Image (cartoon, rainbow, N blue to C red):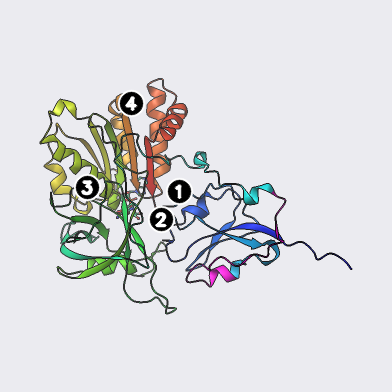
Amino acid sequence: MNAPEAVILIRQHLIDPEVCIRCNTCEETCPVDAITHDSRNYVVDADKCNSCGACISPCPTGSIDHWRTMPKAGAYTLQEQLSWDELPVQQEIAADASPAPESLAFDAVQVNAAVSPSSTTAPWSAAHPYTNLYTLKTPITATVAGNFRLTADDADSDIRHIVLDFGNQFFPILEGQSIGVIPPGTDASGKPHYMRMYSVASPRDGEREGYNNLSLTVKRVVEDYDGKPVPGVASNYLCDLQKGDTVSLAGPFGSSYLMPNHANANLLMICTGTGSAPMRAMTERRRRLLKTQAKEQNGKLLLFFGARRSEELPYFGPLRKLPAELIDMHLAFSRVPDQPRAYVQDKMLDAGKAVSELLDGDTYVYICGLKGMETGVMQALRDICKDAGKDWSALHARMVSEGRFHVETY
Ligand code: NAP
């Protein structure tokens, strides 16, 4: 009688559909195109995935980091994964099954930070971030303490400053971290909405200093990327909230896009539109520190902020009131009638000397906003360094590895 054929096992990489916020970062990062998606789920092709781990650290929620030991012949197919609302539990594995000969299948995942030009570690002095305290299954409820329009009445966009209060519940947050908003109701297929991520716009000690609350910067989305009138589910829900309403949230999320805790570190901040949220949080943190320590002890803040017009720029009024001793600010407006279009990268080139000088020091770079800005901003940094006789590639690589170069674009 022939011996039964050995069952070969693999370590199958899976994405948790309950936690994934569909930000596409994993699909963009995967070097072997193993990750794909439909209108709802992000899934991993077991035949293509080589467990390289490049997608793990860029994932903002940790939903990417799930593994099941599976018989190679019975690995979950793409079709199966696309139909899931939650991850299946680990199956019982036959005792005589053996790992696949491809050693990678059982290796510890190696995080390949070099794939991304952004730091995957926090600044050395950053405060300890708490993450994943609340999830889709075990959310926290916050109460709306305020919802204020930030853009001018005649502005095209409705951008809002929304303050959420946690009462006596534990929800510690640091500047640069995000929270997941869980919109109520179901989507067109009758499934609960997946959560959406928003960067926090307030500092660690609260939107209102000493209070257990935080703020978000939310733009009401009225059309999709193709310009079709499709209202954004979470943004319209948030923008319509009234004082006293309650909101289900998950998080906090994010353990690398954090500010340094040593006050003499410099911050170079580059943002567009609502990408200003983390910059406001960091700037406000530094503004409050100014009250308790001599200004010479504080590092420099250099901000480049782009919007279509001043009327569309969130926090335009409050920003203008910040003292010059706190921040060197450069605003770029792209659609002011009778004026040439200016983007943040143009303003960076104009202020090349200040940027170059800051890059020589103990400086931490933060970029947030439109995905499209990345190319221009990186080119501007390269050009500024070239003009100053510096090697941007080497400096960039060093800053990334030292937790000093952080990018969050969508
Ligand atoms: P927006 O109003 O569409 O754009 C802001 C400015 O950026 C405009 O002046 C725009 O110019 C300019 N811009 C367009 N393409 C550019 C490029 N290639 N390089 C440099 N500047 C460019 O911005 P928004 O709608 O607020 O979007 C901000 C982005 O931040 C969104 O993708 C959002 O998802 C993301 N974000 C938001 C948060 C949050 O917590 N709310 C957090 C992180 C990231 P023109 O339109 O005139 O070309």
How far apart, in angstroms, are the residues tagged by discs 4 and 3?
A: 30 Å
Ligand 1 within 8 angstroms of badge 1 C-beta: no
Sequence-first disc among 4 and 2:
2
Image marks 3 and 1: residues in contact by CB distance under 8 Å: no
Q: Residue furthest right?
A: 1
Position above or below: 406 against 50: above
- Residue type at mark 1: give it: Pro
Instruction: Give the distance between the C-alpha atoms of the residues marked 3 and 1, in whole angstroms.
Output: 23 Å
Q: In the image, residue 71 lies at what x, y percent?
A: 67, 63
Tell me how far mark 3 sits from mark 2, CA to CA. 20 Å
Residue 356: which disc? 4
Residue 69 position in % (x across, y down): 61, 60
Q: Quadrant of residue 325?
A: top left
Q: Which residues are magenta?
A: 80-102
Q: Which residue is mark 3?
A: 204
Residue type pointed to by label 3 = Arg
